[in-house]
Image (cartoon, rainbow, N blue to C red):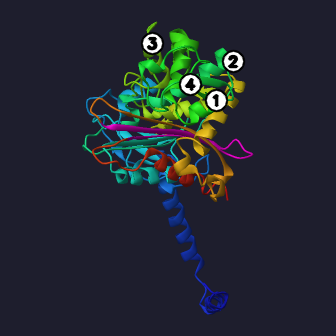
Amino acid sequence: MHWRDDKTRLQLRRKQPPVSKTFLKRLLQFGALGLLFYLGFLGYLNLPGWIFSGAADGDGRTAKPDVVVVAPEGRAPLPDDSLDKKKLAGIIGSKAFEPDELYTFRIEDGEGHSLFVRTTMDPALQSWALNFMPKVLAKSTALVAIDPKTGEVLAMASHNASGQPVNVALTSSFPAASLFKIVTAAAAVEKKKLSSDSTISYDGGKHTLYKKDIKGDIDEGSHQATLKQGFAESINSVFGKLGAFSLGPKELESFAKRFHFNQPIHFEMPVEESQFTADQEKDPYRLAELASGFNRMTTVSPLHGAMLASAIVNNGKLMEPTVVRDVFDLDNNIYYQHEPVSLGQVVSESTVQELRKMMRAAMTEGTGRKSFGDAASHKVLSKLEIGGKSGTINNDQGDKVDWFVTYARRKGTDDSVAMAVLVVHGEKLGLRSRVIIKEALIQYFKSRVG
C-alpha cells in the first residue's frame, strides 16, 4: 500500500466514534478463548511445525507442507520402537521417487499407523533428474548424486521404458565395464607403487582385448602408454596386463572388496550387491578381462557407481550412503535419525592424488573430452575440478550399456559431489551418459558458483 493511502486511512480512523470498553472487553475474552482452543487443538495433534507452516529446517531448506502416502503392501509392519536401515529397507522397499516426494513422504501399514520420512535429496537437482530421465529415450536409465563427505543421496532418479516399477538405481545387474579400471588403477598405485606417469607396454588396439595381446610383462609390447593415458583412453590391454602380470587375483579381489564389491550396501532401501569374482584365477587372459572390465560378470549398481567416485574426491574415505534424514510420527517421536557412517579409508591420500590425475585426464584428453572439451571456458564448469571414468559394453541381450561416473569439486573449497549415470540403449542410441552427467553437474553447481 502507498504511504499516502495509509496516511488517509489513519486519519479517517481517528474521526470514527470510539469503541465502547464493554465491547472491547468481550472481544478480548472471545479472542482469548479462541486462542486457547486453537493451542489445545495443536497440542492434541502435536504435529511437527514444519508440516503446518512449511518453515525452513535446520539446513535452511523449506520443507514441503504436505506428504505422500506410500502403503508398503506385503512388507514389514511399522515398528513400535526405533528403526535402522535394514528395517526401513523392508518397509520402504525399492520404490522409485516421485516429483512430490522431494522432502517428505508418509509410510503406513494399512492399519492406520503412519510415519513420516524426510529425505536428504536436493530438491532442484532431484526435480531436474526426474524430469530429464524419460527424455533420454533408452531402455533403462538412472542418475545418482551423492555428497561425498556425508554419503547423503542428493538425487536418485531412474526410468524404465518397459513401465515396470523397477528402481534402476538400486539394481546391480549391469556390467561394470571400464568402471572397474578405477579399482585396478588404485591397486596398481597403492600396491605396486606405480604413478600416473608410469609407462606400460602393450599390444593390440585400445578398446579390444585378444588373447594374443596378453603376453610378456608390462614392459613388453609394441606400444607404450602412461598409466594416466591408459586410464583416460580406457586402453584394455594396458589394464589387462596389469591384472595378469602385476596384480594377480588376490590383489584384484582385495581392492574390489575395499571398494565394496561383494558386500551389502546398508541403505534405507534394498540395494543389490555388486559382484566381482577372480576366484584365484590363474589364466592370464581371464585376469586381463577382469582387471580391464572387459567382461559381463563384474556388475555394479548406479548407486555403487557414484560411491566409487565419491571415495576419490573424499580423499580416499568411503561413506555409507543414505537417503533418509529422519523418521518421526504424529507425536513427533523420532524413530530414525541419520548419522554419517564411514566405511573406512579405501586408499591412501597419496594414491588418491594419482587417481585424480587420471580421472581429470579422462575429461580433458580421454573418453570424456567430446562433452567436456569446452569445460575450461564454460561459465559453470570452469569453476570446478572435474574427474571421471566412462564404461561401455554390450550386455547379454546385445544392448549397449553406457556408464559415466564423475566427481566435481568447486575450486578452492571442499564443496563437492559424486555422480553416476547409466544408460542402457535400445536399437537406437539415446542420449549418451557423458552428456547427461555434464548437464547434471551444471544443474547442481550453477547456483553455487555465482
Number of residues whose C-alpha sits closer than 10 Å to that of mark 2, classed few (under 14), some (14–19) or many (20 or more): few
Mark nearest the camera among 4 and 2 is 4
Number of residues whose C-alpha sits closer than 10 Å to that of mark 4, classed few (under 14), some (14–19) or many (20 or more): few
Which element carries disc 3, helix, strand or loop? loop
Task: Look at the image and tell me whether residue 86 can be seen.
Answer: yes
Whole-angstrom CA distance, mark 3 to mark 4, is: 28 Å
Q: Nearer the viewer, residue 46 or 407?
A: 407
Residue type, numbered disc 1: Thr
Number of residues whose C-alpha sits closer than 10 Å to that of mark 3, classed few (under 14), some (14–19) or many (20 or more): some
In the image, 54: left or right of 432? Answer: right
Residue type, numbered disc 4: Ser
State yes or no: residue 60 in magenta.
no
* Mark number, residue 222: 4
Mark nearest the camera among 3 and 4 is 4
Q: Are marks 2 and 1 in contact (CB under 8 Å)?
A: no
Judging by the rendered image, the residue that carries numbered circle 1 is 226
Q: Main secondary structure of the magenta part?
A: strand
Task: Look at the image and tell me whether residue 83 can be seen.
Answer: no
In the image, 73: left or right of 88? Answer: left
Number of residues whose C-alpha sits closer than 10 Å to that of mark 1, classed few (under 14), some (14–19) or many (20 or more): some
- Quarter of the image for the C terminus: give it: bottom right
Residue type, numbered disc 2: Lys
Whole-angstrom CA distance, mark 3 to mark 1, is: 25 Å
Judging by the rendered image, the residue that carries numbered circle 3 is 278
Which element carries disc 2, helix, strand or loop? loop
Magenta part of the chain:
399-423
